[in-house]
Image (spheres, rainbow, N blue to C red):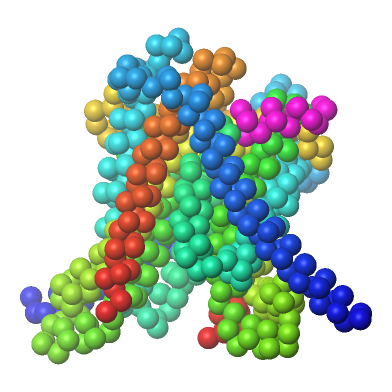
Amino acid sequence: MTRKTTEKIIEGGLALSGALTIIVTLGIIWVLFSESINFFKEVSIFDFLTDTEWTPLFTQKHYGILPLLSGTLLTTLIAICTAMPVGLIIAIYLSEYAPKNFRNRIKPMMEILAAIPTVVYGFFALTVVTPFLQSFIPGVGTFNALSAGLVMGIMIVPMISSLSEDALYAVPKSLREASYGMGATRFQTSFKVIVPAASSGILVSMILGIGRAIGETMVVAIAAGQQPVLTFDPRQGVETITAYIVQVSLGDVQHGSVEYNTIFAAGITLFIFTFILNQVSYWLKKRFHEKYE
Amino acid sequence: MKSMSNLLLNRAIDTTFKYVGIFCTFSALAILGIFLVNIAMEGLARIDWDFLTSLPSRKAEKSGILTAWTGTAWILGLTAIISIPLGISAGIYLEEYGKKNRLASIIEVNIANLAGVPSIIYGLLGLEIFVRILDFGGSLLAGSFTLALLILPIIIVATREALKAVPKTLREASYGIGATKWQTIWHQVLPAASGGVLTGIILALSRAVGETAPLIVIGALAYVPFVPTSPMDEFTVMPMQIFNWVSRPQHEFLVNGAAAIIILLVITFIMNGIAIYLRNKWQKKINW
């Protein structure tokens, strides 16, 4: 075999493993679609989108995704309202205020916070945060959306602060110096110059944070409960799309039954949400890079 | 007079924000601290030799994590075997070969996308493909393949970044003495990038060790009364065992959960510690 053919074979092999990632995506789409189609043969898509009850595991069956959706959105909203301000303040502090060696020491610690398995965060929500909330807010249940959302928020702070900080850090020095030269304080420079200049990067961090919270499973499965109710009361237990998939998977549901197919219908709903968020963030990232390079 | 007070006000705001920043940064770390102390207080007393070497049991005080940690070790090994060659090959292709072609740019968008797919969706993929169609059942093999696909994007991205950091001069010197492209990559570029690649692999595997959701979906069992001895055996893993104990109402099981969390965190922190250490060492070396 000549060197040239060997080289070609190797290149082909490498390309094949790259192409595998495309097959994974196609596989995900195919699996979700084909099993959901079985589901929508039994349940009309209109009922799925408008029915306000989700009780596939009961005798009186209802297949309305809205309660699961409201549970998912409620916990995600709480998480992002916690994580975004805190994450952004940390990012601005580390990028604009903190001494460099302090920043270098804090970043690995933040990485540790991000490396903790999510099941551990679930334990934290159930055994520490929920009792704490119950001590001063009346009516907080053992399982509730507030505790799960807050802990998810804490969980995604490192992600938001690190991505936002990268964006802030990438803003050219000349902008900062021009602002300081006009006599602006660091606070004015940060909020009137740097944050607007890095806004698309900050937005990307927020979108990825939302995507992470929507898809998060263990924290909500442990701490938010398994009651699919259409509510926006954060003290109540709710069920998210992911927690429902876990609930069904833990039980013994026959393949091919409508109950089995529901987890794929729930899964495709989740996938569509995160897919859209991914597209938006990818597009923003591209635009942002074009601006400063 | 007015401008004077404005100046003072602006300075005051600036200083206030500085302390708000310090407060936020430290409260994030303080929460981490509270959290670790709380778990240590709950679970540390429960850890002993019996806890590590006992099978699970209906009685909390007799239960151990033998099946859980052996399952985690199996999963770690098998996932590594499956994902490392694939991830590195794909990373090499994208960084060294596919600079401008269409396939590579599609793969790139696709990887960014895959990295954002929730882990539980990988579980649904694994359930359909590995558990049902390939008929692996709820085995270690099905779990490892599922997790390997999950961490593939992380390994690919890490490989690319490590390769990108290797200076051009190294490649040119190798081409200059007549080496082919692959010889250059295999003998020069890859060894030079190995520190960065290894860091990425360890971080990706530590992610796999902590995953629970996809394994629940593919049917990993909460109660496995035997130690797995082959890739086709049913299994449980540490996070799965923790989830199972935490979901029970009795406090004794919660204590077991806390004890198992300590072991899981030790594994995670050791893996991350090694990765951070390697990265620092490698970053110093790469500044040629």
Please give left or right for residue A113 compared with residue A283 in the image. Answer: left
Q: Quadrant of the image for the N terminus of chain B?
A: bottom right
Q: Is residue B275 visible?
A: yes
Q: Is residue B67 above or below residue A235?
A: above
Which residue corresponds to the image point at 68% horizontal and 48% vertical from the top-left?
A: A79
What residue span does the magenta drawing correspond to? A125-139
Please give left or right for residue A261 compared with residue B105 in the image. Answer: right
A190 falls in the magenta region? no
Residue farthest to the left, as pictured: A1
Instruction: Locate residue B90, reporting x and y percent.
Output: 33, 66
Which residue corresponds to the image point at 56% horizontal and 19% vertical from the top-left?
A: B248
Q: Is residue A245 above or below residue A13?
A: above
Q: Quadrant of residue A287?
A: bottom right
Instruction: Locate residue B250, reporting x and y percent.
Output: 57, 14
Q: Quadrant of residue B143?
A: top left
Q: Quadrant of residue B15?
A: bottom right
Which residue corresponds to the image point at 70% horizontal and 30% vertical from the top-left?
A: A132
Q: Is residue A96 above or below residue B113?
A: below
Which residue corresponds to the image point at 45% horizontal and 70% vertical from the top-left?
A: B108
Q: Is residue A48 visible?
A: no
Q: Is residue A88 above or below residue B171?
A: above
**Of residues B124 and B228, the one drawn nearer to the viewer in this rendering:** B228
Please give left or right for residue B91 compared with residue B153 in the image. Answer: left
**Of residues B75 and B284, the one drawn nearer to the viewer in this rendering:** B284
Instruction: Locate residue A47, reporting x and y percent.
Output: 78, 41
Instruction: Locate residue A293, reporting x and y percent.
Output: 53, 86
Our reading of the magenta stretch's main secondary structure is helix
Q: Quadrant of the image for the C terminus of chain B?
A: bottom left
A132 falls in the magenta region? yes
Residue farthest to the right, as pictured: B2
